[in-house]
Image (cartoon, rainbow, N blue to C red):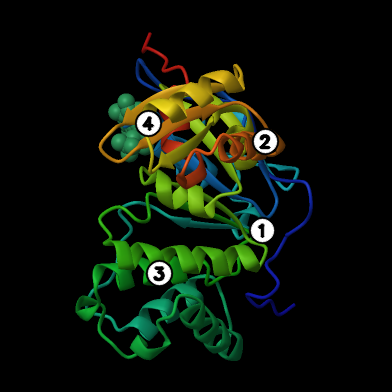
């Protein structure tokens, strides 16, 4: 059956990836410890953690580049058997390692053609797939260019094109934006959104948490080989991110602070800037209570010029989560 990038193979509802007690030891060092990971089908899942936490090891196990010491992996409910080739299951996976090889003296088309042939794509289907992935990563205009002539961002997008040439349903990306400038990162994020739009499940590891906060629907946090979080982004924000409100007055800052003290325990002043007449408060109320606070300040004739709510970022959440110590 002919497949196109508009209908990734194996896409379904439910869990795209599940691991059970996944453990990897290298000699005496345990890089992953009994990881029970769950990634919903169609999710963009951000994997974060400090250096050496086990992100690459987890991704390599999922990509079948390594086999686990203990534990199991399931793709769309089907168990991986690391002792057998399982070509059909392998085809469901696209994998972009952090140091993927590019054959620099090939041009873009020939490079993709080479990988499409490795996946056994036949003539017309191969040509159609190459056109599709080039469109997807916005490199159609570079198809005749030699790879050495591409910018780093373009090379990264070409790597991504290579990893989806066979229409996988799950894409594993290991630190794909490291070393990219802000514009290249933005272009890369757009490609990930395109893939998400096609229903491909994406697991992406990165240290650039602001990128992940923009892209991801769910987050996993690894620390010393333990998966200490695995939750939808929304849930993490609700559970761990506090709301701040920045309030600015053209009048006396003390009057504003007096009014805030009267409001109730939902308000805690975190920071006051007399030079700009601003305070930043931690606010544990809901949006209706925030509206009540604003109304009461206006009624108290505080000359407000600013009142805006901010949510703590993914980075703030990351630093809040208890950091485990190596054993
Ligand atoms: N082949 C190996 N042999 C021995 N130890 C290894 C091997 N691969 C990884 N490790 C160790 O396992 C631990 C986890 O490494 P891993 O590369 O998975 O971490 P990471 O979270 O991807 O780190 P980074 O953010 O720096 O890329 C590290 O202590 C690393 O030194």
Residue 38 visible within the image: no
| On screen, residue 46 above or below 272 | below
Beta carbon of the mark 3 residue lies under 8 A of ligand 1: no
User: Residue tagged by mark 1?
Assistant: 88
Q: Quadrant of residue 207?
A: top left
Sooner in the amino-acid sequence: mark 4 or mark 1:
1
Determine whether, in the image, residue 136 is placed left or right of residue 233.
left
For the point 54% across and 30% down, which residue is it? 242
User: Residue tagged by mark 4?
Assistant: 253
Q: Tags 4 and 1 in contact by the CB under 8 Å rule? A: no
> Disc 2 on helix, strand or loop?
helix
Q: What distance separates the C-alpha of mark 3 from that of mark 2?
A: 41 Å
Q: In which quarter of the image is residue 82?
A: top right
Q: What distance separates the C-alpha of mark 1 from that of mark 2?
A: 58 Å
Determine whether, in the image, residue 165 is placed left or right of residue 210.
right
For mark 1, does the 10 Å Cα neighbourhood hold few (<14), some (14 to 19), or many (20 or more) residues? Answer: few
Q: Quadrant of ligand 1?
A: top left
For mark 4, does the 10 Å Cα neighbourhood hold few (<14), some (14 to 19), or many (20 or more) residues? Answer: some
Q: What distance separates the C-alpha of mark 4 from that of mark 1?
A: 67 Å
Sooner in the amino-acid sequence: mark 4 or mark 2:
4
For mark 3, does the 10 Å Cα neighbourhood hold few (<14), some (14 to 19), or many (20 or more) residues? Answer: some
User: Residue tagged by mark 3?
Assistant: 187
For the point 47% across and 42% down, which residue is it? 59
User: Residue tagged by mark 2?
Assistant: 292
Sooner in the amino-acid sequence: mark 1 or mark 2:
1
Residue 178 visible within the image: yes
In this view, the residue farthest toward the right is 13
| On screen, residue 207 above or below 145 | above
Q: Tags 4 and 2 in contact by the CB under 8 Å rule? A: no
Residue nearest the observer in this picture, 276 or 41:
276
For the point 41% across and 24% down, which residue is it? 270
């Amino acid at each position: 059956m002919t497949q196109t990038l508009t209908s990734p193979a194996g896409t379904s509802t439910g869990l795209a990836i599940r691991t059970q007690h996944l453990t990897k030891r290298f000699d005496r060092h345990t890089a992953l410890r009994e990881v029970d990971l769950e990634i919903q089908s169609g999710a963009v899942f951000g994997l974060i953690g400090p250096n050496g936490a086990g992100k690459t090891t987890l991704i390599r196990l999922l990509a079948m580049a390594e086999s686990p010491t203990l534990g199991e992996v399931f793709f769309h409910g089907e168990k991986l058997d690391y002792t057998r080739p399982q070509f059909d299951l392998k085809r469901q996976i696209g994998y972009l390692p952090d140091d993927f090889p590019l054959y620099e003296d090939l041009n873009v088309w020939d490079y993709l053609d080479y990988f499409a042939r490795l996946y056994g794509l036949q003539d017309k289907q191969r040509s159609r797939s190459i056109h599709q992935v080039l469109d997807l990563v916005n490199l159609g205009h570079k198809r005749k260019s030699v790879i050495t002539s591409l910018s780093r961002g373009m090379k990264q997008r070409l790597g991504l094109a290579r990893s989806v040439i066979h229409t996988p349903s799950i894409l594993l990306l290991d630190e794909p934006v490291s070393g990219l400038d802000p514009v290249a990162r933005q272009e890369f994020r757009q490609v990930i959104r395109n893939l998400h739009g096609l229903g491909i499940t994406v697991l992406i590891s990165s240290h650039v948490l602001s990128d992940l906060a923009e892209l991801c629907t769910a987050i996993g946090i690894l620390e010393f080989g333990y998966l200490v979080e695995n939750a939808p982004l929304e849930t993490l924000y609700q559970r761990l991110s506090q709301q701040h409100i920045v309030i600015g007055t053209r009048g006396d800052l003390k009057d504003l602070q007096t009014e805030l003290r009267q409001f109730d325990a939902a308000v805690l002043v975190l920071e006051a800037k007399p030079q700009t007449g601003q305070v930043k408060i931690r606010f544990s109320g809901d949006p209706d209570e925030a509206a009540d606070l604003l109304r009461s300040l206006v009624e108290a004739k505080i000359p407000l010029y600013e009142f805006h709510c901010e949510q703590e970022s993914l980075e703030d959440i990351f630093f809040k989560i208890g950091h485990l110590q190596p054993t």
